[in-house]
Image (cartoon, rainbow, N blue to C red):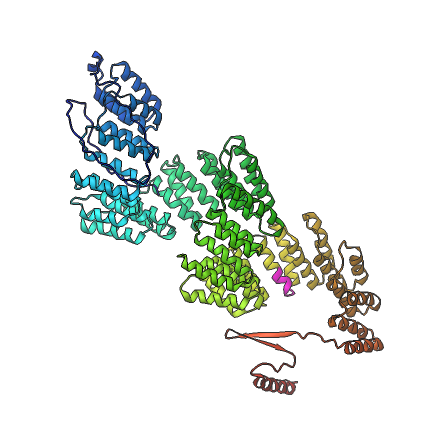
Amino acid sequence: MVSLLEPIAQPPPLQPPKESVDLRASKLSFKKSNPPRRRDFPPPISTSPAHFSPLDDLVSSSTYASVLESCKCPRLGKQVHAQAFKNGFHGHEFVETKLLQMYGKCGCFDDAVLLFDEMRERNLYSWTAILNVYLSNGLFEEAFECFRQVRLEEFELEFFVFPVVLKICCGYGGVELGKQLHGTVIKYGFASNIYVGNALIDMYGKCGSLNNAKEVLCNMSKRDCVSWNSVITAFAANGMLSEALEVFNKMSVEDHFTPNFISWSALVGGFSQNGYDEEAIEYLYKMQAAGFQPNAQTLASVLPACGRLQMLYLGKEIHGYLTRHELMSNSFVVNGLIDVYRRCGDMENALLVFSMYSMKNDVSYNTMLVGYFENGEIVKAQELFYQMQREGKCEDIISWNSMISGYVNNLKFNEALNMFHQVMWKEEIEADSFTLGSALAACPDMDLLRSGKEIHSYAIARGLQTDPFVGGALVELYSKSLDVGAAQKAFDEVIKRGISTWNALISGYARSDDMVGVECSLENMKADGFDPNIYTWNSIIAGHVENAHNESALKLFLDIQSSGLRPDIYTIGTVLPACSRLATLDRGKQIHAYAIRFGYDSNTHIGSAVVDMYAKCGCVKHARLAYDNIKKYNLVTENAMLTAYAMHGYGEEGIAFFRRILDNGFIPDNITFLSALSSCVHAGLVETGLEFFNLMRSYNVKPTLKHYTCMVDLLSRTGKLNEALKVINEMPLDPDTVIWGALLGGCVIHGNLEIGEIAAHKLIELEPGNTGNHVLVANLYASVGRWSDLAKIRQLINERKMHKNPGCSWIEDKGEIHVFVACDTSHQRTDEIYEILNILTTQIRLEN
């Protein structure tokens, strides 16, 4: 988070030199582990007195100082420099120091260093100015060497040097150097100086030593708002928001300082930066209620919270505020607005802000790329990337990484790998760990495992296989291929293993149904200092579901809740299919209620899973209610609802729903057409079925065996048996037992022995040991009165001792599943069940 603090120290105004004073500097050596790069500071060019022009009386040094302090343009600053040189101020200590400060403020690093090296006279202000120049350019080690050189000069250190020098610690030396500098501050008697005290708090905060920061605050004899704000910012920046709030409340109690704009902004930014999005927005409103209007920096810090919460209306309100207050020139708020719009799926407004206000930098371009990919607008992402290439904006790896990961997230794995290969061929661009990790994610199945191994080889050649991101992706690659041995080896290569790497390994063992490996990995993970988090348990639940251990998955879900962990949206999405497969309606409803309580039910993927669960549990009405609650529909949600109608024989409703899918602009796939054709079967609408089957060509959907089976079933049920046989004979696929069974079923209904015998022979030829096929043939003979043939089939079944597997039914009562088959006596409460059954049978007979 960018610090919201006002400058923590301002040195007293620099005055024209009057008289030089000979002061000695005590020698002080700072300990450090590695010798830094040294820069030899040349001595002043000449120590002889400077000769000033008579024009000095006309344009004074104070005039130049005033002009240079207000100068923000490097070109104008250089013109003033030239005029000062012309007017005889070359070598003038005071004016050249002001020039040095101007160059530093304008970002002219080379000009500042050159001027400093050529200065005839340097004072403590000059050294402080060059220190600031180094720090502004992130050259912390060079700044430290500069300070060492100051210690060798004959200067007595003043208080204003330390607020600058203390900034070195966050980039070089850390808190250890900071503590040594703190000791020097005490030695020189500046510990009571409010500017130095504030700088110490800031330094300790940025180095993460918060107890020391708080201790400095407590020991300060005099404090101001900046002191309190420095501590608030330190706690907020380090994620300790409760402590930041405590200090925020104390400042008015202990020192009677009312929290000011900086105090509020620090809290708002801290909450947002650490993912406390609701709190960030709450304190933004409180800030306004306290009479403080947010500036561009405050709003830039809160915009990510709006995006993560997908609060489009608030993003638009902030957009309006920024426009009214003419703050749209700030690149941070512009990029923040683009991010809000793309996270909320409003790419039209994102493009508007990008086109009208953006500086078209790497951040804004890549935010747009990510937005297009997240919203499935792949063509627009490609067009923008080509535009970036034409404008020379793809000179680094970031944009290429955005394209690769975007393709992966949209399941365009071949395109992602092609993009990765383009990176490999570009000499001016070098793949980084994110490139390799994203490319490895494009190898999700056995078909692309070879490509994944090639990337693994490249990673080894570059020495990147030990990187946590690359190593984690390799573990995941081999885990998905169920090669846990290779996954374990890739895991062992990673030097700094994080919890995500552990989770990838545990997921591999879970997916391979190796629960012993899961248990061992969990123990090793804890020994490594990581406690299992919700993602760990999600991966284990997913392994249970993939391996059909649905009861274990549901039990683990309950255990997670009992442990105090909060199941997230991925937990819900993983465990709902277990309810679907077990057709356990009560537990499905409980998980649905949990999803509603935490606002997950309106999510596209969760909503689809809930619809599927209710459909498979036989509750089409509840499935439709869940469907209507989804905020954003896609083809998955449409297919889930259409399948629900088709599964339960709602033919007319399914046909109407399919037409609505087309009207809403969705592109149907093979699942959509399969459910639509199933609806036609249930409705008995042959013409509609033929219409939908022929429509598949228009959407480039190639019919599968299941689509042909639907058509045969539809034609057979409606008595068009010759047409059904023609479909089987002309289709480009080999018929299976299901399609012959559909034809035979139609022959039984309509008593067509000729075609029925053809289907029967094919069925028995394909599955001679299947009792069900022989039963179907027997039913065919019974339907046409061929009793002698029926007797032969029954005799054959008895001779071969063939038995039809009985169908079963089950009910769920108080979380327990009870399974029954015909004439079952295995249940522990069999006597009670048959007693009730006899009572019911007697009552039915009496009523009839």
Q: Position of residue 673 (x, y in %)?
A: 67, 55
Residue that extends furthest to the top in the rendered view of this protein: 54
Q: Please indicate, yes or no, whether residue 477 appears anywhere in the rendered image.
A: yes
| Image quadrant containing the C terminus | bottom right
Q: Quadrant of residue 714?
A: bottom right
Q: Position of residue 73 (x, y in %)?
A: 34, 25
Q: Position of residue 33 (x, y in %)?
A: 32, 41
Q: Please indicate, yes or no, whether residue 598 appears anywhere in the rendered image.
A: no
Q: Left or right: 406 with respect to 697? A: left
Q: Position of residue 658 (x, y in %)?
A: 64, 55
Q: Left or right: 829 with respect to 242? A: right
Given residues 445 and 487, the one toward you in this image is 487
Q: Quadrant of residue 733?
A: bottom right
Given residues 484 and 119, the one toward you in this image is 484
| Image quadrant containing the N terminus | top left
Given residues 330 and 441, the one toward you in this image is 441
Q: Left or right: 708 with respect to 836? A: right
Q: How many marks?
A: 0
- Main SS of the magenta part reads helix
Q: What residue is drawn where x is 35% and y is 39%?
A: 296
- 326 over 66 or under it: above or below: below
The reply to whether the magenta stretch includes residue 515 is no
Which region is colored magenta?
A: 643-649
- 85 over 175 or under it: above or below: above
Q: What residue is drawn where x is 45% and y is 61%?
A: 522
